[in-house]
Image: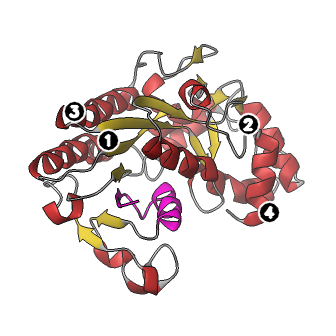
Amino acid sequence: MRAVISGATGLVGRALLAELPGASVLSRNPRSLSGSSSPVGDTSRAPRVHAWNPELGTPPDEALEGLDTVFHLAGEPIASGRWTSLKRQRIRDSRVLGTRHLIAGLAAVEERPKVLVCASAVGFYGDRGDEPLDESSGAGNGFLAEVCAAWEHEAMLAQDLGMRVVCLRLGIVLSTRGGALARMLVPFKLGIGGRLGDGRQWMPWVHIDDVVGLLLFASKQSLAGPVNACAPHPVRNLEFTRELARALKRPAVLPVPVLALRMALGGMGDVALASQRVEPRVALEHDYRFAHAELRGALEDLLRRGA
């Protein structure tokens, strides 16, 4: 596959690049992906890196010409740092302006790619309690829901260029190498982990292997529009807490009070407490087979492999 990946230094981008060693990369920091810093760990197979700052302008034409697929994963991390007004603006601009500039770049090349697979997030749905949610469900309320809706709108404009567009709405990506699970491991290993708030909020989780699997699946199949990238069996936070504690053979008896969570994380605290009972209807209807459909097996696999 002739592909280019933006956001290849992130958790998902690194994992995808490891499966596509021939892909090239769009990066605001090319040095981080050159030589010995190659995510695939093999300097002889290091990706070709093109410099691009998503907020400032279009990618270079040579990075987009004659490809099969663009995997657009770039975006300011939402889980690091408090959500100041500047942080919120960077979260939005990196996704909305970045995607707008990418589409402008695609419009400028003569032999443009056939497919755009753009990251999005289940944050699109907002906090919806126990409501079952699939790709036909409308957008929710709140900052992340607004960002995701605007992000997807920009991506879908690539259809006007004759491209097939998939917006992959990522759930909580589980990996010991980064993201939510990696942050949980230290307190849980110390026996001081616990549920968030009352623990009744639904967590649409997904194993990192299935994120990569769905990205590749979306690029090759006849999918278009939104696709939920989450396991077919979401769990409540309380069940997730119990399963992680069980996998680590540690107790999990210290709940994190809502007020403390919001004081520590600011706006991100509300995201951690949001309930999203998301189902991957489109992926299942197109016969995608999840490698890790059940939480217990997924956690055991990740902890055993360090994946």
202 horizontally vs 39: left or right:
right
Q: Which residue is at 30% across, 44% downward?
A: 95
Disc 4, SS: helix
Identify which amino acid the numbered label 2 is placed on. Answer: Arg
Residue 33: percent from the left, percent from the top? 38, 75
Asked if residue 41 can be seen in this view, the reply is yes
Which residue is under mark 4? Answer: 304
Label 4 or label 1, whichever comes before in sequence order: 1
Query: Quick check: marks 2 and 3 in contact, CB under 8 Å?
Result: no
Occupied quadrant, residue 22:
bottom left
Mark 4 and mark 1: span between their CA atoms? 36 Å
Quarter placement of the N terminus: bottom left
Pointer 1 or 3: first along the chain: 1
- Looking at the picture, which amino acid does disc 4 mark? Arg
Residue 102 coordinates in the image, percent (x, y): 21, 49
Which residue range is magenta in the image? 1-20
Q: Label 1: which residue?
A: 88
Which of discs 4 and 2 lies nearer the camera? The answer is 4
